[in-house]
Amino acid sequence: MRVSVIGCGHLGIPHAAGMAEIGHEVIGVDTDQAKIDTLNRGEAPIYEAELPELLKRHTASGQLRFTTSVAEAAEAADVHFLAVGTPIDADGRGYDMGQVFGAARALAPHLTRPTVIIGKSTVTPGTTAKLADLLARHAPAGRDVEVVWNPEFLREGHAVADTLRPDRIVAGVPSHRAEDIVRELYAPIDAPLVVCDPPTAEMIKGAANSFLGLKISFINAVADMCAASGADVATVAATIGMDPRIGSGGMSPGIGYGGGCLPKDIRAFTAAARQLGADAAADLLRAAEIINEHRPASALDLITQALGGTPAGRDITVWGAAFKPGTNDVRESPALAVARLLQDRGARITVHDPHAVPTALARHPELEYTTDLAASVKGAEAVVLATEWPHYRDADPAALRDLPTEPLIVDLRTTLDPHRWTAAGWRVHQLGRPAVGTPQ
Ligand code: NAD
């Protein structure tokens, strides 16, 4: 099929590449000319596993191309995916829907034949109906432009795999014709297809991200209780996760959720709950947000305790800048929140990340960075593991042992094997777990 993907960001690029991979002819559209030029060279402007290979292969064959022209996309495709951003609005409550309606307004005058618009962005409930009205008024094809809502569940760091092998596909469809098109589009993908009405599809996405946020905040709240009581949160999390009603996914205690999606989606879903009169739901979600907002402060308490005093004047290395492993996305990164909090308290900070140093530097030039793991720990009085990259879990503690001033590691992601590190002479503090290690 001939499809366009409007908005080439963390969602749109893997989606465009994935649609080409399953055999569609794809044109990606973005307003950012530099990004389009990079993509047309077959290069990935974001760090994602498998993405460089797909972009190279499909741009070289001509099956995938990119443009800044919506007119060209309207000419080239009969199905248009909307994958533009929905940041939080200026007053911090709902989504700023400017990119979604802006892209639809730009596309509308070029829609002269029956077309299906498939929304993938995460949006305010009711958006599909508003877009359908807007397009009916502004597109020459009128009501022959149909709008489907097909929320995206990909996880950054697994974006290509989740696009090609999702655990489910949700399509909120306005008609049988639109449903048939969705079925044909995704036919090469082996995943359950949930067909529903558009408001249900919009709600599924908001509810899914909010539930994830609740789960993460719940185990983080339990981590604080474990820290205060001497219990081991890693064992608690693993064991309660064995109950299939609870499940172990999202049960890693740490410094909270971040990134370009979860924080804003929970904020917006809370606002939607309030607007819809579901105050108890809004209060529940707000509690999850408050727990999340407090995570850097909990991390600071643990670091202070591990150091035996204030971080002021100390040389501290923070391992990780990306909001999670597998991506170079640093939007609302908890790791950088911890680094900045430590710097505010007077510590001298060096941040290491294997892939996210350029994006972190662009957003937070006030911090010092390195991409050299050994150099990052040299002279440090504490190493703080803030993003659970495998590089840190697999690092050789014996080889690093003599580089820092103090062989002290504070693991904020409960990801290290503490016995391996203590055997090599390190003192290990983990969030929500009793400290282990030889006193220095
Ligand atoms: P992003 O900011 O990385 O990308 C958005 C892109 O849209 C940018 O490249 C921007 O230049 C482009 N754009 C803006 N207006 C445009 C227009 N009028 N025409 C063409 N391009 C335009 O955002 P993202 O992380 O890719 O998220 C996009 C949407 O997908 C959001 O609603 C988000 O909540 C949702 N989502 C994201 C993920 C994820 O993992 N990032 C997962 C699921 C859902």
Image (spheres, grey):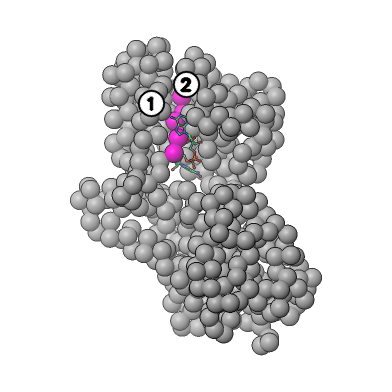
Question: Which label was assigned to residue 70?
Answer: 2
Can residue 80 be found in the magenta stretch?
yes
**Residue at point 47% right, 48% down?**
260
The answer to whether residue 80 is above or below residue 97 is above
Question: Which label was assigned to residue 104?
Answer: 1
Label 2 packing within 10 angstroms: few (<14), some (14-19), many (20+): many
Query: Disc 2 beta carbon < 8 A from ligand 1?
Result: yes
Single out the residue that lies furthest toward the right. Answer: 399
Can residue 198 be found in the magenta stretch?
no
Question: Which label was assigned to residue 54?
Answer: none
Which quarter of the figure is the C terminus placed in?
A: bottom right
SS for dot 1? helix
In this rendering, position of residue 113 left or right of residue 368: left
Point out the stretch of residues depicted in magenta: 78-85
Can residue 63 be seen here?
yes
**Residue at point 42% right, 68% down?**
294
Q: How many discs appear?
A: 2
**Residue at point 57% right, 55% down?**
365
Where is residue 81? Give x, y as percent.
46, 28
SS for dot 2? helix
**Residue at point 51% right, 56% down?**
333
The answer to whether residue 44 is above or below residue 435 is above
Q: Amino acid at mark 2?
A: Val
Q: Amino acid at mark 1?
A: Ala
Question: How far is mark 2 from mark 1, CA to CA?
Answer: 10 Å
Label 1 packing within 10 angstroms: few (<14), some (14-19), many (20+): many
Where is residue 97? Give x, y as percent.
35, 37
Single out the residue that lies furthest toward the left. Answer: 277
Single out the residue that lies furthest toward the bottom. Answer: 439
In this rendering, position of residue 14 left or right of residue 275: right
Where is residue 183? Give x, y as percent.
47, 26
Comparing 213 with 198, the one in front is: 213
